[in-house]
Image: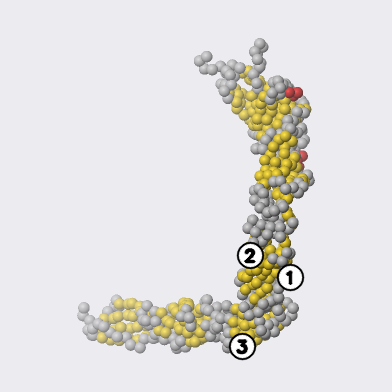
C-alpha cells in the first residue's frame, strides 16, 4: 500500500548484477548470465521513502550452450574418453554415443570429462554431449565421430582344397579394418602367410594331414586387433588312431578314428580272413558294421574324403569277434563242514565253442598284506565253486573266449564271507559271576555265547560288543561265535582265565590301543549314600580310563539263593541306582576300564536301604 513504483535488483556471487524499475508487476530483468545463480531483491518506493523489509528470493538461469567436444579411444579398449569445456552453472552433463548397430552407451558427469564404458570394437560411434537443467531444455553439442579399434576376426572357417593341397580361409566381415594378415604355422616348421583387404584368403601347398595353428589380425586406420587363434588339419591324409569295439550280442563292430580336418565323409571296410568284406560309409568319426560272425577275425581300415579327393587307406587293424562277458553273474555262499564255499554261476554267451574262466580276488581278513587271487581253469560249463577263507571280502568276474580271443571280464560282483571265530577269548571273575571278552572278528556284526554242556547249544548272550557278563559260568562248556548277514563263524572254544586284567583288541585300531596297554589304577569309592530305596555312589577318577564298571551286589542271606549282581557301565565319576529293596544291605565295588584294560575292583562299601513309609 502507498507504493508508486518498484525496484528489482539481481546480484550474482561473481559480482554481476542487473536491475529493472516498474510501476506495476511484472518487471523484466535483462542481461543475466547463463548458468548463474542470482539473488533477487524487490523494493517498494514512493516519493517520500522506500520499503524497509525487501522481498528476497534466488533463481538460477538456464545452462550455457556447448560449442565443441573431443573424443578419444585407445587401441583394443572398450572405453571412449569424452572431454569438453565447462560452461558456467551447468550441474550435470549427459554424454551419449550411438554406434553403427544402433547400440547406445551413456554416462553422466559434473566435470569436464566422462568415460563411456563397454563400447564395441570395430564400430563407428557418433558422440553428443548435452547439458541438463531444471529451468530449460537440454542443449546439445555438435556430434563428434570416432572409430574404435578393429575386432578380433571371428567365425573363422577353413575349407580344404585338394587340388593344390591348400585351404580356403574365411572370417566375419567388418567395416573398420582396412586390411588383414593371415599366418598359418605347423609343428614341422612350415609357415604360410597371406595379406588381403577382404575377409578371405587362399593358402596353397600345405603339408598333408598336419595341424596348422592359424592367426588372423585386422588392421584399422590407427590400431591393429589382437590376433584370432584357431587350428585346422589339412586333407586328404589317411585317418589315424583306429579303434574297434566289437559287440558279440548284436554281432556288430563299432569302428572309430581321429578326425581328418576338412573331411566330409569317410569310407571304411572290414575284411575277414576267409575273404568276406563288409563296407560302411559315414560323415561322422565312427561307423558300425553289422553281420559279423562270432569267432571271426577281421582287418579294419578307413579312408577320408572331402567330396573331391580320397586319402589313402589307413593301416589295417586286426580285431576278433570275441565273446562278450556273461550278462548275469551270481554268487551264493554255502557252508560245507567247517568251510564256506562261493558257488558262482553265470549266464551262457550266445556264441559257438565258448569256454569260461571265473576269477576271484580279495583281502583275507581285510588285510592288504594278505591278498588272494584265484581263478578257475577254462571250462565250457557255466558254474564253478571256490573255497573262500572266513572274514574275507572279494570280487568275482567271469571271462569268455573262443577262437577269436579272450573277451573282457564281466562287471565285478562283490561278496563277503562269514566272519572268523573270535580269538583270544578270556574271562575275569569266577564261575558264579564272570565277564567273558574276546578280540574282534573282521566283518562281524554280532557275537553269541552258547553253553554246550548238554550236547545242544543254549544261548547265554548275544551282543554287538566284545564282552558279555555271565553268571553260572563254565569255561569248559562255553563257546563264542561271530556272525554277519552271510552266516555264523565256527565256534571259538579255547577260553583262558581267570585273568587279572581284561584286554581286548580291535584289529583295525592296533596302533591306537597300543598306547592304552598300561595297567589302570584301582578307583576308590569316595561316598556311598542312601535315600529311600536309591543308592548314590561316587569314586575317584583314574588316568587313562574311559569308563567304569559298577558292581552292585545284594548281601547274601544264609539259606537263600544269592541274587545276581547288578552291573552298570558309567562314563562319569558317580552313579545313582534306583528301585532297590527296602531294608536291604547292598555292597558296591568299582573298576576302571578303557578299550583294552580293566583294573581290579575296589574294596566293597555297603549301606542299608531305608524302610518304606507306612511299613
The disc at residue 315 is 1
Relative image position of residue 371 (x, y in whole percent): 77, 46
Relative image position of residue 374 (x, y in whole percent): 77, 46
Residue that numbered label 3 is attached to: 196
Instruction: Classify 10 Å Cα crowding around label 2: few (below 14), some (14-19), many (20 and above).
Output: some
Relative image position of residue 469 (x, y in whole percent): 68, 27
Nearest to the eye among marks 3 and 1: give it: 1
Q: Quadrant of residue 406?
A: bottom right
Instruction: Classify 10 Å Cα crowding around label 1: few (below 14), some (14-19), many (20 and above).
Output: some
Identified at 65% across, 32% down, the residue is 463
Relative image position of residue 553 (x, y in whole percent): 65, 21
Residue at the far left in the pictured view: 2
Element type at marker 3? strand
**Observer-nearest residue: 248 or 335?**
248
Element type at marker 2? strand
Residue at the far top in the pictured view: 559
Mark 1 or mark 3, which is nearer the start of the sequence? 3
Identified at 69% across, 28% down, the residue is 449
The total number of labels drawn is: 3
Identified at 41% across, 79% down, the residue is 132
Residue that numbered label 2 is attached to: 288
* Mark 2 → mark 3, Cα distance in angstroms: 45 Å
The answer to whether residue 326 of the structure is visible from this angle is yes
**Observer-nearest residue: 327 or 55?**
327
Up/down of 508 relative to 315, above or below: above
Amino acid at each position: 500500500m502507498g507504493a508508486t513504483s518498484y525496484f528489482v535488483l539481481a546480484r550474482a556471487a561473481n559480482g554481476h548484477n542487473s536491475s529493472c524499475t516498474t510501476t506495476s508487476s511484472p518487471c523484466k530483468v535483462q542481461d543475466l548470465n547463463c548458468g548463474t545463480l542470482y539473488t533477487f531483491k524487490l523494493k517498494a518506493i514512493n516519493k517520500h521513502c522506500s520499503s524497509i523489509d525487501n522481498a528476497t528470493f534466488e533463481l538460477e538461469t538456464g545452462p550455457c550452450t556447448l560449442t565443441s567436444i573431443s573424443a578419444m579411444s585407445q587401441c583394443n579398449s572398450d572405453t571412449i574418453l569424452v572431454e569438453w569445456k565447462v560452461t558456467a552453472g551447468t550441474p550435470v552433463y549427459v554424454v551419449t554415443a550411438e554406434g553403427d548397430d544402433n547400440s547406445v552407451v551413456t554416462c553422466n558427469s559434473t566435470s569436464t570429462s566422462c568415460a563411456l564404458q563397454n563400447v564395441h570394437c570395430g564400430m563407428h560411434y557418433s558422440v553428443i554431449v548435452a547439458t541438463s537443467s531444471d529451468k530449460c531444455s537440454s542443449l546439445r553439442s555438435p556430434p563428434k565421430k570416432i572409430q574404435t579399434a578393429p575386432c578380433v576376426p571371428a567365425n573363422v572357417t577353413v575349407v580344404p582344397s585338394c587340388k593344390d593341397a591348400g585351404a580356403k580361409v574365411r572370417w566375419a566381415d567388418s567395416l573398420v579394418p582396412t586390411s588383414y594378415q593371415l599366418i598359418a604355422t605347423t609343428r614341422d616348421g612350415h609357415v604360410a602367410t597371406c595379406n588381403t583387404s577382404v575377409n578371405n584368403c587362399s593358402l596353397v601347398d600345405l603339408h598333408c594331414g598336419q595341424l596348422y595353428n592359424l592367426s588372423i589380425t585386422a588392421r584399422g586406420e590407427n590400431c591393429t586387433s589382437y590376433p584370432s587363434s584357431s587350428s585346422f588339419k589339412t586333407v586328404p591324409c589317411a585317418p589315424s588312431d583306429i579303434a574297434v569295439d566289437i559287440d558279440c550280442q548284436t554281432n556288430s563292430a563299432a569302428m572309430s578314428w581321429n578326425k581328418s580336418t576338412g573331411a566330409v565323409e569317410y569310407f571304411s571296410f572290414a575284411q575277414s580272413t576267409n575273404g568276406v568284406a563288409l563296407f560302411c560309409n559315414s560323415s561322422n568319426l565312427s561307423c558300425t558294421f553289422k553281420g559279423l560272425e562270432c569267432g571271426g577275425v577281421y582287418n579294419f581300415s578307413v579312408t577320408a574324403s572331402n567330396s573331391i579327393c580320397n586319402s589313402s587307406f589307413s593301416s589295417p587293424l586286426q580285431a576278433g569277434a570275441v565273446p562278450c562277458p556273461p550278462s548275469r553273474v551270481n554268487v551264493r555262499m554255502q557252508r560245507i563242514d567247517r568251510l564256506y564255499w562261493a558257488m558262482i554261476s553265470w549266464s551262457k554267451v550266445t556264441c559257438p565253442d565258448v569256454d569260461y574262466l571265473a576269477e576271484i580276488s580279495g583281502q583275507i581278513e581285510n588285510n592288504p598284506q594278505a591278498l588272494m587271487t584265484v581263478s578257475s581253469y577254462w571250462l565250457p560249463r557255466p558254474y564253478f565253486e571256490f573255497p573262500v577263507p572266513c572274514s574275507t571280502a572279494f570280487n568275482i568276474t567271469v571271462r569268455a573266449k573262443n577262437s577269436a580271443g579272450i573277451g573282457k571280464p564281466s562287471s565285478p560282483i562283490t561278496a563277503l564271507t562269514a566272519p572268523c571265530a573270535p580269538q583270544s577269548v578270556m574271562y575275569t571273575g569266577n564261575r558264579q559271576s564272570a565277564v567273558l571278552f574276546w578280540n574282534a572278528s573282521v566283518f562281524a556284526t554280532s557275537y553269541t555265547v552258547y553253553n554246550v554242556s548238554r550236547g545242544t547249544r543254549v544261548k547265554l548272550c548275544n551282543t554287538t560288543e566284545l564282552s558279555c557278563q555271565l553268571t553260572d559260568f563254565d569255561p569248559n562248556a562255553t563257546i563264542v561265535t561271530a556272525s554277519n548277514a552271510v552266516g555264523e563263524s565256527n565256534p571259538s572254544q579255547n577260553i583262558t582265565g581267570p585273568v587279572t586284567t581284561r584286554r581286548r583288541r580291535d584289529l583295525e585300531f592296533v596302533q591306537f590301543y597300543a598306547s592304552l596297554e598300561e595297567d589302570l589304577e584301582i578307583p576308590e569309592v569316595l561316598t556311598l549314600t542312601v535315600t529311600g530305596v536309591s543308592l548314590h555312589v561316587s569314586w575317584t577318577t583314574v588316568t587313562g580310563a574311559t569308563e567304569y564298571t559298577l558292581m552292585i551286589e545284594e548281601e547274601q542271606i544264609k539259606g537263600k539263593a544269592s541274587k545276581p549282581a547288578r552291573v552298570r557301565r558309567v562314563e562319569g565319576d558317580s552313579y545313582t541306582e534306583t528301585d532297590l529293596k527296602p531294608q536291604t544291605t547292598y555292597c558296591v565295588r568299582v573298576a576302571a576300564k578303557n578299550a583294552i584294560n580293566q583294573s581290579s575292583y575296589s574294596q566293597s562299601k555297603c549301606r542299608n536301604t531305608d524302610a518304606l513309609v507306612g511299613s
